[in-house]
Amino acid sequence: MSEPVLSLNNLRAGYGQTEILHDLSMHVNANEIVALIGPNGAGKSTAMKSVLGLLNIREGSVVLNGEDITNTPAQKVIERGISYVPQTNNVFVNLSVQENLEMGAWTRPTGVEARLDEMYDLFPDLAEKRGQPAGSLSGGQRQMVAMAKALMVDPKMLLLDEPTAGLSPKYRSEIFATIQKIKNTGVPILIVEQNAKQALGASDRGYVLVDGANRHTGTGAGLAADAEIARMFLGGGH
Amino acid sequence: MWEFVNYYFIPGLVLGCIYALGAIGITLTFGILRFANFAHGEIMMSGSYLTWTVMAIAAGAGLTLHPLVAMVPAAVMVILLFLATDRYFYKPFRKEDTIKVVMASFGMMLIIRSAVQVIWGPNQITFVRGIAKPNATLSEITANWGLQIMMPNKHLFIFAGTIVLVIALGYLLNRTRIGKAMRAVSDSPDLAHVTGIDVDKVIRATWIVGGICATAAGVFLVMDTQMLETTMGFRMLLPMFAAAILGGIGKPYGAVFGGLVIGLAEELSAYPWIGTAPLLSPGYKTGVAFAIMVVMLIVRPQGLFKGRSF
């Protein structure tokens, strides 16, 4: 089996004195969508932020394509090819859609025009709204802008933090379809989701995170079918 | 009618231009670095002293420099001063509570003013001698249209300079990469950080733009009053903040609009609207700016252009 694109090895990390991740190990292979699910406060978003160098990793390592990027500042991580879409406030509301995408390309300023055209092909809804302020768009459209913005650097790896939070079921399905399209362009995706059932259904593999450590690992479909996990996290709600 | 235009309205616009340019720097600093920079007025003031010094040195060498020319090297020095104060006095507090960097800027205000008083002395200095006569050509042309507009050259230069700077600012913010990044950081510094935008570079650009506008504002002020005073920056501070708040914090066009409104309101408040005495004694001009600021903060704290509210 080939080397994973991104791997987190025995991570211990947190904010200040508080440790949130106690022993997290996971990886994402090429051409894979991997879901990270778990209850509130399990450390799902923290795991993503630790990759971006937004909080201090005390032990363990983050490796991108064989290169150690543990505790590298966000700007350098992005330059090396990891793009991140935060859960909230993920677009510049006062900038137009196109300006948002241009800002996404900050660390890769060449070939922006061609990249913009590719994004408008991938997200046709955005093409006609390119001049509008991102703040005037609906929640689902903003999420599209946020993903397109993250893809502007032609990343080796895309991190999505709860891309469907607060969206209507129609938009949720649309977002998952788009994620599939992004994967087909050759970008592996790590996705953190509260909406576990749908996320696992759309993913190749999944990790269940409990109390800052990975508890279960398996294929997306396998985890979704697991009786214990269903009882613990999936509930009947979604 | 023409007395109103020539002695109240045009001077109001001139003052408005000066406030507008000063308020641009304040609103950009507030939007991008997220703090109220109390030293902004002093930076303006030191810019005009530096301009005067450049002109004096040139005069010593037998050269007569127009203030708008002498302003260029002065602006470079002001920018260096801005960058140095940021590096040594503001940056160390960037990750701390905002109040610390505000207090640092308050300290900077006192340091700069005292330094100017040590170097150039505490007394008034004449910037330009003589009475500014109205531009004869302009009076002639407008007279042909039945207008009696009287404007001295200095006011024409101030209008032209302000228009050029505001257009250049608009181009920078809407058409250039760094300008768009300035708007992005003003929008959300956290998102800018995880987008990979070089926030430190954006902050430097902010000081450069603020420094150019502040120098211009300071020089335009002394071109208008023909007088250098070490307290002039502080006197400008309140109306400039009022202009920034009126327009909406973080909105450069709002600051320009706010500056013009405050400048006009201050001058027009002294017009004899009722009877023959000034409506408000000219001594209360600053009070007008203060009143507008207070009302605005109560009624519409986000400003006319929907900036950030406190």
Image (tube, grey):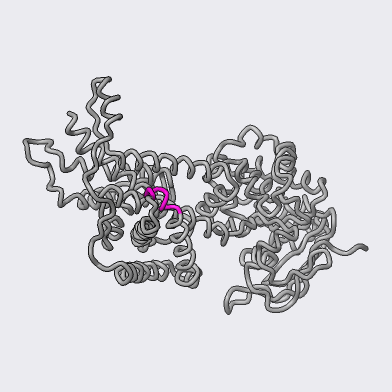
Q: Residue at horizontal 61%, vertical 46%?
A: A100
Q: Residue at horizontal 81%, vertical 58%?
A: A205
The furthest residue to the top? B145
Decide if residue B46 is in sight here: yes
Q: How many marks?
A: 0
- Asked if residue A18 lies in the magenta stretch, the reply is no
- Asked if residue B71 lies in the magenta stretch, the reply is yes
Relative placement, left or right, of B201 versus A3 is left
Q: x%, y% of residue A3? A: 88, 64
Q: x%, y% of residue A151? A: 72, 49
The answer to which quarter of the image holds residue A17 is bottom right
The answer to which quarter of the image holds residue A126 is top right
Q: x%, y% of residue B120? A: 31, 67
Residue B81 sits above or below residue A14 on the image: above
Q: Provide the residue span drawn in magenta.
A: B65-72
- Report the magenta stretch's main SS: helix
The furthest residue to the front? B62
Looking at this view, is B20 or B304 the one in front?
B20
The furthest residue to the right? A1
Q: Residue at horizontal 33%, vertical 38%?
A: B156
Decide if residue A238 is in sight here: no
Q: Residue at horizontal 72%, vertical 71%?
A: A70
